[in-house]
Amino acid sequence: MKYPITTFRQLYYACKEQNKQIFEIALQNEVEKGEYSEYKVRLQAAKSLQAMKEAINEGLKSTELSPSGMSGDECNKLQKRYKETHSILGPVAEKIMIYALATSEQNLRMGTIAACPTAGSCGIVPSVLIAYAQENKISEDDEINALITAGEIGRIVSNKMSLAGAVGGCQAECGVASAMASAALTQMRGGTVKQIINAAALALKNILGLTCDPVCGLVEIPCVKRNPFLAIHAVTASELAMADIISKIPPDEVVDAMEQTGQLMSPLLKESSKGGLATTKTALALVKNILK
Amino acid sequence: MYQSSIIDIISPVMAGPSSSHTAGAVRLGLLARNIYNAKPDKITFKLYNSYASTGKGHGTDKGLLAGILGFSVCDKRIKNVFDTPEAEEIKYEFEFLQDFNRHPNAVDFVIEGGLNMLISGNSVGAGEIEITNINNFQVKLNGKYNTLLLVYDDMPGVISSVTGIIQKDNVNIASLHCDRSGKGKDASMCICLDGELSHACFKEISELKDMYIVRYIKKLES
């Protein structure tokens, strides 16, 4: 067994050889690297999980608008709708979308959130993980294990490429978050190591090329709504993977493609707000009104 | 080469809205504060590229100042930092610049006071940061290690004296980077440590001949 693990292939074979789950190998890998103890990693996961739950609870109650006034009341609208009628996707999906909006709106109010992997994408992992856990009576220990697995997926991608929108576009932020969430979900549903890694790869593959073109340079449009979208995207990846549908392009090669796509993406579309949605007529009018 | 940890991916717990533009900015400010290690008279924050074009909206200016004032990434005061009593005690200004030779999220801290210092750094994603230059010396600081930073006269034997003193504490050296402005001129050394350096050893290193700047920069809380 070789440490440190830097690829999905290595992760898969380590799990297979030792007959262990991803979070177990991930913790072992952290200890082998020598920077952190298993206790320290579990403790941080517990702290982040707690912060995620608090952000959801705060976000559910608040209708405070962001400093720009552009967003902050959409979680409330969705909650109202689901009090009257139901989503065709069922109660877990309703909760996922509501929680993703709640967290994301809490973030733009400069509230406290857990960056996972980034703040702009902070609603995706918690919404999927916590909504599923609540609806299926998953223990807190298993939630933490799922979060560690999510972290391991993000860690392996981040060994190849930066997770900053300014470097890799939104595929590197919300895209990676969606892959992390799909892995956490697949693990909680009892998926195999192969299914978990494929869920992550399928999610990544489907989001290649996603740009980062925030209106007025703020983490609001399109970031807030992108969180519930990519949370449900993670569920789709998990559904496919649980049916043993695999990514025909191996997970590590998908990451290579993502890195290359990030490099090829114009700087105008990487968090500079100089192209895409950020330079539409309406966006430019908003810039005039808001950033004056 | 540093390998990221799961901890980097699922944290920090922070004030929103952007890990690179808000939390990263706070952490850059905190490191700059520890490097300067004195009360400055005035700070000019120079923000580059994406930091310049979208910094205001992301609270990057607030984050940088909050870090300089010693606030943590989840401090509730960041949102209104310009109105805090701490902020009123120092002079500061912001410049917003474009330079394609710099990182997309780059910042310079131009610090004036008893000692003038120029500290440059980047926010490299997911709240992770690096300080790359101090007074035009190349350095490598990411806030993950306790770090000893030295500026001194370039001459034979300095590295050996310094590492010899560190050895007394039985602390392992994780990385060591040196740079100099020219042969026999100013030189810099940046030593990342796996443990804590004792006060006695720090003092002994400070008292070595021709040391101009000696700083022990504690690692940042994750």
Image (cartoon, coloured by chain):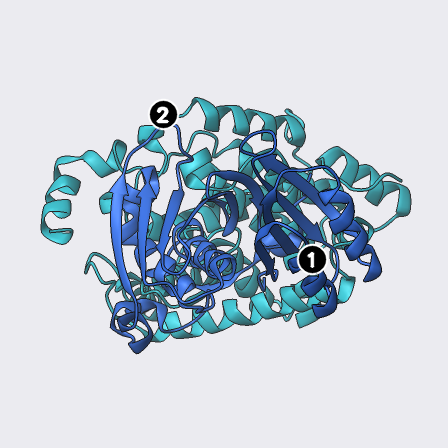
Locate residue B176, reporting x and y percent.
Answer: 70, 43
Q: Please tell me which residue lies in front, A29 or B144.
A: B144
Q: Is residue A66 above or below residue B179?
A: below
Give percent across and percent down for residue B58: 32, 53
Residue A15 in sight from this viewpoint: yes
- Rendered shade, chain A: cyan
> From the viewer's perspective, is A71 left or right of B51?
left
Which chain contains the residue that carries disc 2? Answer: A
Picture quadrant where residue A104 is located: bottom left
Chain ID, blue in image: B
User: Which residue is label 1 attached to?
Assistant: B205
- Residue type, mark 2 in image: Ser
What crowding class fits label 2: few (fewer than 14 Cα within 10 Å), some (14-19), or many (20 or more)?
some
SS class, disc 2: loop
Is A179 drawn above or below residue A262 in the view shown? below
Q: What residue does disc 2 label?
A: A266
Q: Where is residue B46 in the image (x, y as percent from the top left)?
A: 32, 46
